Amino acid sequence: MTTPATMTVTNKLAGSGPGDARGRAPQEPPSPPRAVPDALLRGARGLCPACGAGRLFSSYLKVSPYCPDCDEELYHHRADDAPPYATILLVGHIVVPLMVLVEEMYRPEVWVHLVLWLPLTLVLCLTLLPPLKGMLVNLQWALRMHGFDPQSAEREGPPDGVVPVVRAVRPLR
């Protein structure tokens, strides 16, 4: 004789229980994968992750809400503190070894260190920050993070003051 627990397990394994796919609404097919290396290269150049032609930034570090060429929604990004963190990490790994090397080889005065390393650090940070932010935003797009996936529960409407782009739909023939 079988127990109720055994029957439940058997029913679920056989596909006739409540976990069965027959009782569910049809789901949309999964979206095709997006190429991460292409998206990262486009982000380093400050270009749209989808088309590679439109500009990603509307100013120095402000991401455009939509691509001006293909109308891809870009306002879903959540770059936050990651680009500055990556910039500091990268610049620190460049400047600190050079600073130690110069100190050990030449033993310059403190003012020489200040004249050398402060401008170099500032220029490197300001130069590397936009490409790193572009790479992060495009990585989020490629991995369908933070609302970049149309089927995501995180998907949200455009921010206040941003007019949504209405895409034309081709008529069926």
Image (cartoon, grey):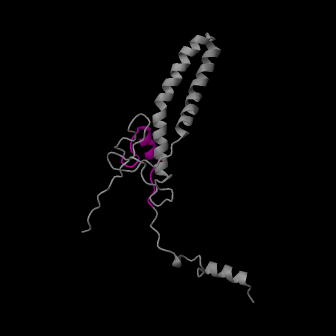
Relative image position of residue 91 (x, y in whole percent): 55, 29
Reply yes or no: does residue 36 show up in magenta: yes
Residue at 61% across, 12% down: 110
x, y percent for residue 105: 62, 14
Is 47 left or right of 7, judged from the image as shown?
Answer: left
For image coordinates 43% across by 54% down, the residue present is 157
Q: Position of residue 99 (x, y in %)?
A: 60, 20
Q: Is residue 156 above or below residue 111?
A: below
Write down the region rendered in magenta.
31-51
69 is higher (above) or lower (below) than 95: below
Quadrant of the snapshot with the N terminus: bottom right
Q: Vertical placement of 1 versus 150: above or below?
A: below
Q: Residue furthest top?
A: 109
Q: Residue at x 46, y 73 (%)?
A: 26
Q: Position of residue 151 (x, y in %)?
A: 47, 61
Determine the residue located farthest toward the front in the rendered image. Answer: 160
Q: How many marks?
A: 0
Q: Nearer the viewer, residue 91 or 84?
A: 84
* Residue 123 lies within the magenta run: no
- Foreground residue among 9 and 73: 73
Asked where in the image residue 2 lies, by quadrant, the reply is bottom right
- The one nearer the camera, 163 or 5, is 163
Q: Residue 103 occupies which quadrant of the picture?
A: top right
Residue at the bottom extreme of this rendering: 1
Q: Could you tell whether 85 is left or right of 139 in the image?
A: right
Horizontal side of 1 relative to 16 (left or right) equals right
* Quadrant assignment, res 170: bottom left
For residue 115, above or below residue 50: above
Which quarter of the figure is the C terminus placed in? Answer: bottom left
Residue at 61% over, 24% down: 97
